[in-house]
Amino acid sequence: MESTDDVWGIVLAGGDGTRLGPLTRYIAGAPCPKQFCALSGSRTLLGQTLDRIAPLIAPERTVVVGNQAHAGFLRRELPGPVPHTLLQPSNRGTAPGILWPVHWVSWRDTQAVIAVFPSDHFVLQEPAFLAHVARAVGIVRQHPGVLVLLGVDPDGPDEDYGWIEPGEALPGAPGCFGVRGFWEKPSAERACTLFRSGCLWNSLVFVARVERLKSLGRRYVPDIDARLSRIEGFAAGECEAWALRQAYRLMRSANFSREVLETGTESLAVLPVYGVLWSDWGTPERVVRTLRRISAAPPWIEAWSKQSA
């Protein structure tokens, strides 16, 4: 692997996991956001994500972004000074959840290459998946104006995912393509069409230069970017927490895929991921289906399946 001294990782751990709530409550015995629950094995989904990216990104350049409401979970999961933990005052969706740590990193490293990872994914062939991330890092170094998404080879027409239609080959980057179209959670009919057309699932794992991500924020969610930009004047000072609270108090909720990716396809490229079993664990049905597919049998699965039948 090439040197990764300029690569920062942002791990998204701020979701409430409402749809998976019944299952995580059953497993944990109490309300527990899914990223802090051990759905398979002894490690939580957040812990598995951090283990997955560790060979590529050093802990001191890893940022976990969560919400103040989950501070107790995060302290138990991450008791040390690294990875860095950023607590949003409230959940305002994935656009602020991504762009706030992007700004935070930019104040420390203006030349950073950022890789973004949701913390609620299952990946079976982890080294192969991480090799695709490393490949995306190399492409971004070669094409600094591009945001490279990892597009997963779909196994069905799932309308609950975002879909990517690859376009023309990216010059000098074999196997990587521009993006002709992007659909966030299409209708069932459209998902069938996209599946038949060879489109890819959006993993929401992506790589881009820090300044490119900030420019996308300025262009597509300028109101959110403006509020986050004002925090810089208070960064690392005693009023930074106050400035962050003020920014979020006045900030609307926004979805990064819908408001940035879907509208900014000219800035995107997609790197197809084949031969890797990947799943976004958003629903109990998807978790159970994945575990049965790999013949995994955590202690809770049989009792839960009987209860929910």
Image (cartoon, rainbow, N blue to C red):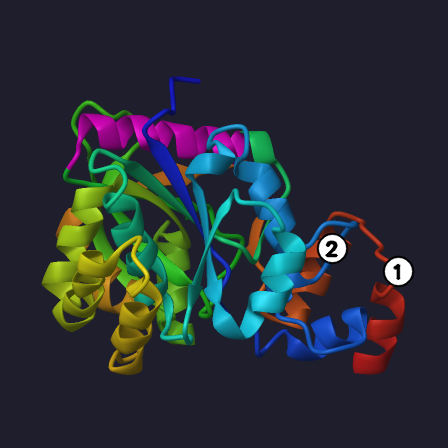
Q: Position of residue 87 (x, y in %)?
A: 45, 64
Query: Label 2's element?
Result: helix
Q: Secondary structure at mark 1?
A: loop
Q: Amino acid at mark 2?
A: Leu
Residue where numbered disc 1 is placed:
299
Residue drawn at (46%, 32%) of the image: 57
Residue 307 coordinates in the image, percent (x, y): 85, 81
Magenta residues, as a range? Answer: 128-144
x then y, percent, for residue 299: 88, 60
Q: Residue at x 16, y 48 (%)?
A: 267
Q: Quadrant of the C terminus?
A: bottom right
Q: Nearer the viewer, residue 219 or 135?
A: 219
Residue 64, above or below 184: above
The residue that label 2 is drawn on is 291
Kindly identify the residue that appears in the image at 89 percent across and 72 percent down.
303
Density class for disc 1 (Cα within 10 Å; few <14, some 14-19, many ≥20) is few
Q: Amino acid at mark 1?
A: Pro
Residue 239 sits in which quadrant? bottom left
User: Callout 2: few (<14), some (14-19), or many (20+) C-alpha neighbours within 10 Å?
Assistant: some
Quadrant showing the N terminus: top left
Q: From the viewer's perspective, tell me whether residue 277 is left or right of residue 140.
A: right
Marks 2 and 1, the one that precedes in the sequence? 2
Q: Residue furthest front?
A: 238
Task: Decide whether the magenta segment is chiefly helix, strand or loop.
Answer: helix
